Amino acid sequence: MNHDPATEMTFIATSDLAAVMKGRSMRTEDFHAGSTVGWVPANLGIGIQGHIAEDLPFGSTGDLRLKPDLSTRRTVTGVPGRPDLDFVMADVVKTDGSPYECCPRTFLRQVLADLHQEYGINVVAGWEHEFADLDADYPHHPFSFRSFRCAEPMGSQLFSALARSGLGPDTWLPEYGDHQFEITLSPVPALEGADRAVLLREIVRDVYRVHGHRATFTPVPKLGGSGSGVHVHFSLSDDAGRNVSWDPSRPGRVSAQVGSFLAGILRDSADMCALFAPLSISYQRLVPNNWSSARVFLGLQDREALLRIVPTVEIGGKDPEPQLHFEFRAADAGANPWLFFGALMRAGLDGLRDGLEPAAIVERELDLKGRDKDLPALPSTLEEALDLFESSERARGWFCPDMVHTFLSVKREEVDQMNRLSLQERCEIYASVY
Ligand code: GLU
Ligand code: MG
């Protein structure tokens, strides 16, 4: 990764259960290959509004380190009016350098290693984010040139910053919702993909802030309006680069092996829902007709599906085989990318280990009043999702007990606070955090 030794500061970053990027910085001049900085276990228990939750397995004692993963080092550059910054993602480790079992990034790295070791599968992922500009005043029209132009110069500056900072931006468009936009990033190996998702949000907010605008990734920027999702496109291949999802003889052209993997994700989606939809307002978005996830199913090209088989483009005789991949549509920006994508991969891996029947594919428009009314649903509140997670031996078992305890405490405290507020007030708070 490119980085500029002339920057003044280096930021060493992690992200926590509230999916807020955090870290410490030092002078780039002083940063060297062995540099680590201090971290504290209780930091994991900081809720969305910046307070440490009450009921935690950690107190004021204990020390950890943020250990930079040098392969992620880059210069964040191109944000107007902000100094260039050297940036590196870190793993949280113990003071002897051994892995810390509650580190979300280590959690994803470990499941990717297990998937490779047990099944020879590598995962590549490209992330798609939607966000809203809360301070835009022009009349918005979905996908319009007008909104594209009115969002200048932010759009161009943003793309330039993302490209020059090595995040691989792909496309940029005015989305359906009011002053809503979407950025897609190119696919990269899954750990790097999640790293980019963590950083992307900060760069977007930073560019907008420079212009006096608030960009928010909150799942419900405006009550009753279109939601903002985080969609993850992922594909699975072997070491020879062959797409292991591809089997043209089967429904949806999805191989039996990957069908089992996807069945694992569907099986645990309700139990791990609190991980990918972790805000009390996430459940306002996850309703039918929102193109988020109306039900738990694998859909052929259907935007109401939890998992979507993405169409291949065969214009000009392009080969569909390397293209076939899947999109997970239910997550939002309240979710820590390493943690929830790691949970999806764990669920898929369990599907493989248990030899699940390949997931059935819904190949038609959904009919929730008729033939599809019995398709399983996600929980309808965060409370329900947290209870399901807590009582699911499998989903809970993916994490160390301290992580489970902390996650449940942070999130239940959030539910208590949010339940005292109106939906409108909740939306405003989340819009200011995300
Ligand atoms: N805004 C929709 C969501 O909340 C997604 C729309 C789309 O890009 O298909 O996920
Ligand atoms: Mg979209």
Image (spheres, helix red, strand yellow):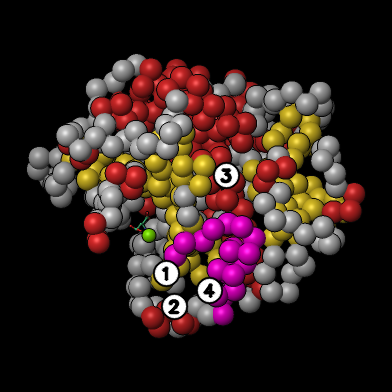
Q: Nearer the viewer, mark 3 or mark 2?
A: 3
Disc nearer the start of the sequence (4/2): 2
Residue bearing the label numbered 2: 148
Q: Residue 255's x, y, as percent?
A: 26, 31
Looking at the picture, does residue 434 appear above or below residue 390? Answer: below
Q: Residues within 10 Å of mark 3 (few under 14, many from 20)?
A: many
Q: Amino acid at mark 3?
A: Glu
Disc nearer the start of the sequence (3/4): 4
Q: Secondary structure at mark 1?
A: strand
Q: Answer whether labels 1 and 2 touch (C-beta < 8 Å).
A: yes
Looking at the picture, does residue 201 appear above or below residue 145? Answer: above
Residue bearing the label numbered 4: 155
Taking 384 as reference, is 109 left or right? Answer: right
Residue bearing the label numbered 3: 192
Q: Amino acid at mark 1?
A: Leu
Determine the residue positioned at 56% across, 40% down: 191
Note whether ligand 2 is within 8 Å of mark 2.
no
Question: Relative to the observer, which residue lies in front, 5 or 195?
Answer: 5
Note whether ligand 2 is within 8 Å of mark 1.
yes
Q: Amino acid at mark 2?
A: Phe
